[in-house]
Amino acid sequence: MTKYFITGGAGFIGSHLTDSLINKGRVAIYDNLSSGSKEFIARHFKKDNFRFIKGDLLDEKFLNKSMAGSDFVFHLAANPDIQLSVKKPSLDFEQGNVATFNVLEAMRKNSISKICFSSSSAVFGEPKIMPTPEDYGPLLPISTYGASKLACEGLISAYCHIYGFQAWMFRFANVIGPRLTHGAIHDFIKKLGKNKKTLEVLGDGNQSKSYIHVKDCIEGMIFGASRAGQQLNIFNLGANDRTKVKDIAQALLKEMGLDQTKIIFTGGKRGWQGDVPQMLLDISRMGKLGWQPKYNSMEAVIKTIKENI
Ligand SMILES: NC(=O)c1ccc[n+]([C@@H]2O[C@H](COP(=O)([O-])OP(=O)(O)OC[C@H]3O[C@@H](n4cnc5c(N)ncnc54)[C@H](O)[C@@H]3O)[C@@H](O)[C@H]2O)c1
């Protein structure tokens, strides 16, 4: 029985991953609950094959001790919000680079060699080719979040080469679904909870990105990690198409029955510093492996709206 260790397992994506891995082996979640929630994983607390450890990845000693006896690490914990790090750039360095280094060191000291990492489309920056394939370069991120993800990929690659680790790195598009903790749909619902007369949308609304439902994301990750056997495996995970932010806002108002709400755009081609306004990943590498997302971007958006309102 595989013993999985999930960093960030109490978060949005991590809790869905837990729902799936709990049927395949033993699961230990390591999370400081900075953006995650115990509620997301409450259904597993009484299970014999489940363990929750409240801990911070910056606490090296406790992390080393907690990881002992595990076989496979899913490393998802990070600062997930690009907007937050614009105000505090050290966030991505500490919660991304340093935390990932600590995870890799804890693995090395505990003789664990398999890691699956949640990277991001943000590593590509503003690519000239779209859909963007995994081997696109040069990789020039435009946010400290993207820079941190790229640095983490580099560190993981080095540990594969030097210490014989095997890694699966997934560059996610925008992941959405139940238990959202951040992102456009989450923000819109929060804003409408406070004021139904107007809905402020950051940017001109023409930002157009690929959205993947969290169910597809988890299935893709597990599929990729079980089928791809290279020492270092890198995959894009997204939908085959994209959708505009203004269409998401309109779909949300329609689903909520708010036909009087006025959408106000703050203007400009990006929502905030570091926002990549156009993003579409080439997912043919996962396709060749035999995986396809079930939902396209708009289907994932509508499903997510229904799941969160
Ligand atoms: N959601 C997306 O659209 C998206 C897209 C690309 C990549 N990702 C990546 O996927 C991963 C999961 O994202 P998410 O959307 O589920 O975010 P999330 O905030 O819901 O989950 C992150 C989890 O990590 C925990 N955490 C953060 N710092 C920690 C630390 N120092 N020690 C221990 N736990 C810590 C948080 O409490 C939280 O439970 C992140 O690495 C994120 O960068 C997410």
Image (tube, rainbow, N blue to C red):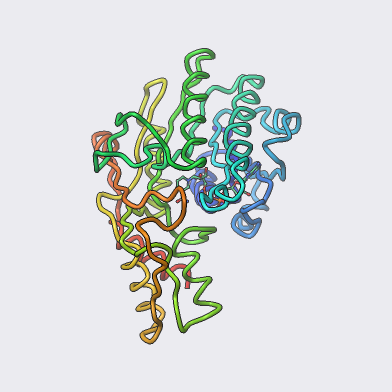
- Position of 237 relative to 71 (above/below): below
Q: Residue furthest right?
A: 61
Residue at 58% of width from left, 23% of height from top? 112
Residue at 47% of width from left, 14% of height from top? 161
Q: Nearer the viewer, residue 184 or 113?
A: 184
* Residue 67 in which image quadrant: top right
User: Picture coordinates of residue 153 (x, y %)?
Assistant: 47, 29
Q: Number of marks in the image?
A: 0
User: Picture coordinates of residue 244 (x, y %)?
Assistant: 30, 61
Residue at 42% of width from left, 42% of height from top? 122
Q: Is residue 139 visible?
A: yes
User: In the visual, does 138 lie left or right of 164?
Assistant: left
- Position of 306 relative to 41 (above/below): below
Q: Residue furthest front?
A: 268
Q: Which of 285 and 185 is in front in this view?
A: 185
Q: Nearer the viewer, residue 285 or 271?
A: 271
User: Picture coordinates of residue 196 (x, y %)?
Assistant: 48, 82
Q: Which residue lies furthest to the top in this view?
A: 162
Q: Which of 131 and 77 is in front in this view?
A: 131
Residue at 36% of width from left, 52% of height from top? 212
For the N terminus, the quadrant is: top right
Q: Can residue 26 be seen in this view?
A: no
User: Picture coordinates of residue 38 (x, y %)?
Assistant: 66, 56
- Position of 237 relative to 103 (above/below): below
